[in-house]
Image (tube, helix red, strand yellow):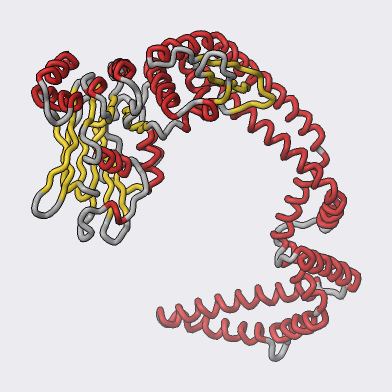
Amino acid sequence: MLTNLSIQNYALIDDVNVSFTDGFTTITGETGAGKSILLGGLSLVLGKRADLTSLKNQAQKCIIEADFDVSKYNLKAFFDTNDLDYEDSTILRREILPSGKSRAFVNDSPVNLEVLKRLGEQLVDVHSQHQTLQLTENDFQMRVVDALAENQEALINYKIQLQAYKVASKNLSELIEFQANSNKEHDYNSFLLKELQTAQLREGMQEELEQEYEQLNNVEQIMEQLASGHQLLNDEQMGVLGRLADLKRAFQNLAEYGDRYDSLNDRIQSIYIEMDDIAGELEHLKDGVEANPSRLETVNGQLQTLYDLQKKHQVASVKELMAIQDQLAKRVDAVENIESKIQEQQLELEKKTKAVQVLAERLRDSRNAVIPKLKSMLQENLYALGMPSATFKIEINPSETFKANGKDDLVFLFSANKGSAYGELKKVASGGELSRIMLTIKSILARYEQLPTMMFDEIDTGVSGEISNRMGEIMKEMSETMQVFSITHLPQVASKGAQQFKVYKEENLVGTTTQMKRLSEEERIQELAEMLGGKTISESALAHAKQLLQ
């Protein structure tokens, strides 16, 4: 509920700060005193767009703050989703800068206007005689039926099953579409896959083949270099090994003359052993190398195949070709097994369809069960509000498709006068009739739902004293379970409030400002008497005002 409202530098308001309690609050004041300004300021902090004309002083920023007790609204999930700090006492703030820019905050965290608006919709429902479009919307009408049927839990279960049905339906459509598109490409993909499989791809094969090709293609030069190296090492007269052997023997004799010679001898011994090992390996390599034109041709062919495949698929490695091969294998396999997958998904969809159908039928049964009660409640309340002949024709008909709230079409027709044809609310109900119907429906909803703070803006315009008295009673009854505000010109409604505020203008040397204050008991009597009889207050008006308050 709204606990405090602070408005600075907005329209005719310099600085207004008022606190509210729960229950029914009425707001009165002369025409032009600024009641609509107050409502405009509240609308800004609830997410309405603003412009520079909102600023009273164009050189200063406008600041509007609204404090709410949100402990009963189950809004923690909303705060978590939007990364906001949750507090039972939540503050919404809106700033409009002289530059024209606007900033919004929730508990001092900056938010965009859309988040502020969505939160505001869950905190305050502002309703005026000209804001009755919601009443004519089919979803809102169905919400009223579901409230009476206590379908909240059933709707949650239905929506869970509906989501599962939609997923199954989407999966089946995607499989069928995939089959239609893939059949055209299947033969080509199969050909590409077979081409890659024939190449027997494996990691590292290209490097191995290229190395082998270089060896086979240069076999004569390799043989010549190996032979030359072998001769240099093993020549009887000038071979490196022979000369090293002489050096080794010479230094073996010096080793006994000191550590320095012994260390040098060890190094010469190591060199000799290493060179002898190299000589053996050269011998082995020389004997193993031979020309193999047939193998050279095979290797060259394999490399050319790899190069051609890489060019064809626009890649630069065997690893990338292997990845493409895996993708093609999956595509080919998917097409070859698509029929069985489609059949499986069709069975899954049938299962989900039956589950959601059962829940949709339960919703329909519960809705049909409460329609007589809803019609009776509407007609009884409207009778008391000066519409004695108002009747409704409400029907639930099965729909062809699943909807967000079931599989039903709602027929919600209205006739204001006896013998008049039934028609849609937006076509046959006047503005005043719509206001009274909306008030009646909101009062019914208040018994079954946790509604946000309700703000009625002159919903009682154009009605008689007796009817306005009943409208005030309805709003007072609603306030037993929720916070209700009514901006009114009628003393019969104003007197029903647990607290009453007056909006008024003050003039000074600088200009005119709008003020707002809570009225004491005596001030309420004076205000009501003035509303009853004008500026000149008579004794009878005062007596009538006291009677209204009692």
Q: Nearer the viewer, residue 171 or 26?
A: 26
Q: For this rendering, which residue is in front, 320 or 145?
A: 145
Residue 76 appears in the picture as rendered: no
Farthest residue toward the bottom? 238
Q: Which residue: 72% across, 34% down?
A: 172
358 left or right of 26?
right
Q: Residue at x 14, y 34 (%)?
A: 517
Q: Is the C terminus in the top left, top right, bottom left or bottom right quadrant?
A: top left
Residue at the image position 61 percent from the left and 84 percent from the top:
244
Q: For residue 247, what is the image quadrant? A: bottom right
Number of residue marks: 0
In the rendered image, residue 171, in percent from the top left (x then y), is placed at 69, 36
Q: Residue at x 47, y 31 (%)?
A: 134
Against 34, is 518 above or below?
above
Residue 176 image point, x, y percent = 77, 38
Image side of residue 511 versus residue 412, left or right: left
x, y percent for residue 54: 28, 51
Q: Work out whether residue 164 or residue 11 is closer to the camera in this orientation and state it.
A: 11
- Say if residue 437 shows up in the picture: yes
